[in-house]
Amino acid sequence: MVSLCATPAAAILACLANGALFVGCLYIRAGPPAARRPLDRDDPLVIRQRFVRVAIASAAAPLVPLLAAAASPPRPHCPTLPAARAFGLSSRAPLAAALAPLALTLCLFLGPLLAVWLERDTATPLLQRARAGARTELARLQLARNLLVGPLAEEWVFRACMCPLLHGAGWGEGEAVLLAALTFGAAHVHHRIDGRQSWVAVAFQFTYTSLFGAYSAYLFLRTGLVLGPLLAHTFCNAMGVPDFGGITTHSHPACVAAGYVLGLAGFIALVTVDAIYRPALFGSPFWEEISY
């Protein structure tokens, strides 16, 4: 049994420490300075090394909230949960908690999905494209990084090992979402260190990743299961940033534009209705639900 209750300040410091540990592990470089190659995140050797380092950071991540909780004074009415539940590894409704976030994300991406489907006769099928893109070792490593290792590590460290502690520290649902989002966005500023992005690009990435971090933190807190945000994260990485500029050049611009509008409207409506009525769908220990 685990009790992830800490002071509000200790919870924030623990989140920052976990974010710093995660990013810091990416830049650990062994060997004498003369033998070190310049960092290139798309170098196969760098990708493999970062897989190992991210695994180490992920293994250490749950220790940070546990230490923060142990170092904090006891709080009244602090819930005690099985370790798997406390870190979002189990749920009372696992199937719904896993698939609902993916369905909500599909709704949000209705426009891009419709754009691909409308050009199905001329566009290369997604499966064929994936096979063609995985022919080289570098491409396979990039796919593994973008669709498996990256989402898995980030959801574990930035959602499963942060959101429960923020909740246990007494931060409200919206506050926990915001704090987790900003930590996630700040962790992506490190791409400037690679020297491959301008500050403008980094600022855009911070904004985009913070927004996604807020969405993913909401999914985690709402469902209480890390698998749902993980599936949504993998899907978003596979789709990429929506190409709003491509709407006007599409062969069916009106249909695609309608898809974007309907998808966004449906997404907002679903989230709003859920926030108002809070139906007891998932039994999340991190979200107040109402049984009707």
Image (spheres, helix red, strand yellow):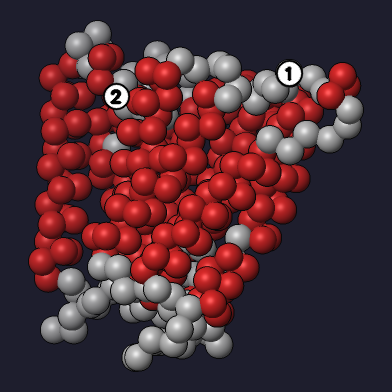
Q: CA distance from mark 2 to mark 1?
A: 39 Å
Residue drawn where x is 37% and y is 18% of the image: 200
Residue 272's disc is none
Q: Quadrant of residue 220?
A: bottom left
**Above-or-below relation of 121 to 249:** below
**Residue occupying the far top of the picture:** 249
Query: Callout 1: few (<14), some (14-19), or many (20+) C-alpha neighbours within 10 Å?
Result: few
* Residue visible at 74% across and 29% down in the picture: 46
Q: Which mark is residue 115?
A: 2
In percent of width and height, residue 231 lies at: 46, 51
Structural crowding at the residue carrying mark 2, measured as other residues with C-alpha within 10 Å and reported as few (<14), some (14–19) or many (≥20): many
State whether residue 44 is above or below residue 10: above
On screen, 188 above or below 57? above
Residue underneath mark 1:
38
**33 and 263: which is toward the camera:** 33
What is the quadrant of the C terminus in the image?
bottom left
The picture places residue 193, in percent across and down from the top left corner, at 58, 25
Mark 2–mark 1 CB contact (< 8 Å): no
What residue is drawn where x is 42% and y is 54%? 229
Question: Position of 57 compared to 199: left or right?
Answer: right
Name the secondary structure under disc 1.
Answer: loop
Is residue 164 at least partly visible in the picture?
A: no
Looking at the image, which residue is at 23% across and 77% down? 289
Disc 2 residue type? Ala
Q: Nearest the camera: 48 or 179?
A: 179
36 or 136: nearer the viewer:
36
Q: Position of residue 83 (x, y in %)?
A: 56, 79
Q: Amino acid at mark 1?
A: Pro
Residue 163's x, y, as percent?
A: 41, 63
Which of the two discs, 2 and 1, sits closer to the camera?
1
